[in-house]
Amino acid sequence: MNTEATHEATVQPTPLQLGDRTFRSRLFVGTGKYDDAETMNGALAASGCEVVTVAIRRVDLDAKDNLLSQLDRERYFLLPNTAGCFNAEDAIRVSHLSRELGLGEWVKLEVLGDKKTLLPDPVGTLEACQILVDEGFKVLVYTSDDPVMALRLQDAGATSVMPAGSPIGSGQGVLNPNSLSIIIEQLDVPVIIDAGVGTASDVTIAMELGAEGVLLNTGIASAKDPIAMAHAMRHALEAGWFAARAGRIPRRRYALASSPSEGVIGE
Amino acid sequence: MIDNQSPDEGIEVCLNGDPQQLPLGCTVSSLVKSLPVEPTAVAVELNRTIVARSLHETTIIEPGDHIEVVTIIGGG
C-alpha cells in the first residue's frame, strides 16, 4: 500500500500537445476582469497555467491603467483572442494586429453571432478559421457544442476546437455533456472546453468527459477570492484528468455493499 | 463644420473611432509617441492597412485618414 505514496506525490497530468508546441498546464486562464494586478498575478500563479488569453483593443486615450503591463510576459504564453468581433473580417483584422503586436501566429478565434448570448456565429467562424489557417495562423477556435460544426472546424485546419460548456461568463458549467463527449470522441485535434465555468467541479466534469484542457476567465476573476478559486481550478483539472483515465465504475440502480456480506455477527 | 482654415494648419483625422486634430505632416511615429502608451506596445492600422513598425517614422498621416492604434489588454 505504501509503495503508491511516492508515485502519488509526483504524478501529474501529461503535458498538452497543441500543434508544434507543448504546454505543461492544461488550464488556460483569461486575464480580464481582475480588480488589480496583484490579484491577477496571484491568481495566474495559483492556477499553475502557462497559457493566458489576452484581448486586443484600441489604446485608451484617457490613459487608464492597463493591468496587463504588470503581467510577467516571460512566464506565460500569451494567446490573443478576437473577442468582441461579430464578423469574420474583423476577427481576421484583429489577428493581423496581434501578429503585428509581436504575439505570433496563435489566435483564439471568436466570431460572435449574438450580443445577449455571446454564442458564436458558425458561418463567420468557419470562414475566418479557413482564411487564418491558410495564412499560417494556429487557430484555437471557440464554437458551440454542435458536433457537426466541430468537425467542420477540424476539417478547416483548426489547431484546437474549443466548444463552450455554457454561455461565456454565465457560470452554468457543462450544460450539454452528451454533445461535448461526442465532439471529444469524434475529433482528432485536442478539444478544450472554453467558457461557462462557474466553479471547480465544472472543470472536473469537463476533464472527466475527456477534454484535453479547459479555458476559463470569469470563474476565477469574479470569484470572491480569485486566488483561492484559481488554486481550486488547478486541482479540479488534475482530478478530472486522472478520473477520466482511471475508469469510473458503472452506475447502478441499487446498492452494492462495500463490506463483505459473509461473517456478520448474529447470523 | 470643421474649421480647416485653422491657424496651426492642423488636419482632421479619425483616431480610434473619434475625430482628432493632428498637426500637418504628422507621422505615425509622432502620433504614437503622443499617446499615453509605450510606443513599442502598439500596432497601427491606417485606412485598414497595418503600418509595419519599421514604417512608422516615414508614414505621414493625411487629412481624413482613419487610424486605429491598438494594444494588448486583459481578456478571456
Image (cartoon, helix red, strand yellow):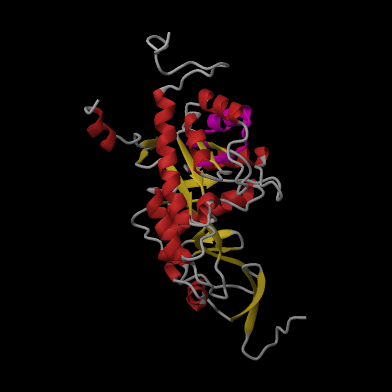
Residue A135 lies, with reference to residue A14, above or below; the image says below
Front-most of residues A206 and A266: A266
Q: Quadrant of residue A179?
A: top right
- How far across and how far down the image is residue A204, in percent? 48, 36
User: In the image, is residue A150 part of the stretch drawn in magenta?
Assistant: yes
* Percent x, y of residue A40: 45, 59
- Is residue A186 shown left or right of residue B14? left
The residue lying toward the viewer, choosing from B33 and A207, is: A207
Q: In this orientation, does residue B32 appear? A: yes
Where residue A94 appears, as percent x and y from the top left, is 56, 54
Instruction: Choose top left, top right, bottom left or bottom right for residue A197.
Output: top right
Residue A32 lies, with reference to residue A139, above or below; the image says: below
Residue located at (37% from left, 37% from top) = A20
As for residue A267 lying within the magenta part, the answer is no
Q: Which residues are magenta?
A: A138-161
The residue positioned 37% from the left and 10% from the top of the image is A263
Any part of residue A134 in sight: no
**Furthest residue to the right?**
B1
Q: Is residue B24 left or right of residue A77?
A: right
Picture mark count: 0
Tell me residue A1's x, y (percent): 25, 25
**Residue in view at x 49 percent, y 15 percent:** A256
Where is A139 relative to A73, above or below? above
Left or right position of A238 against A127: left
Query: Which of B12 and A193 lies nearest the eye of the viewer?
Result: A193
In the rendered structure, the answer to whether residue A76 lies left or right of residue A57 reads left
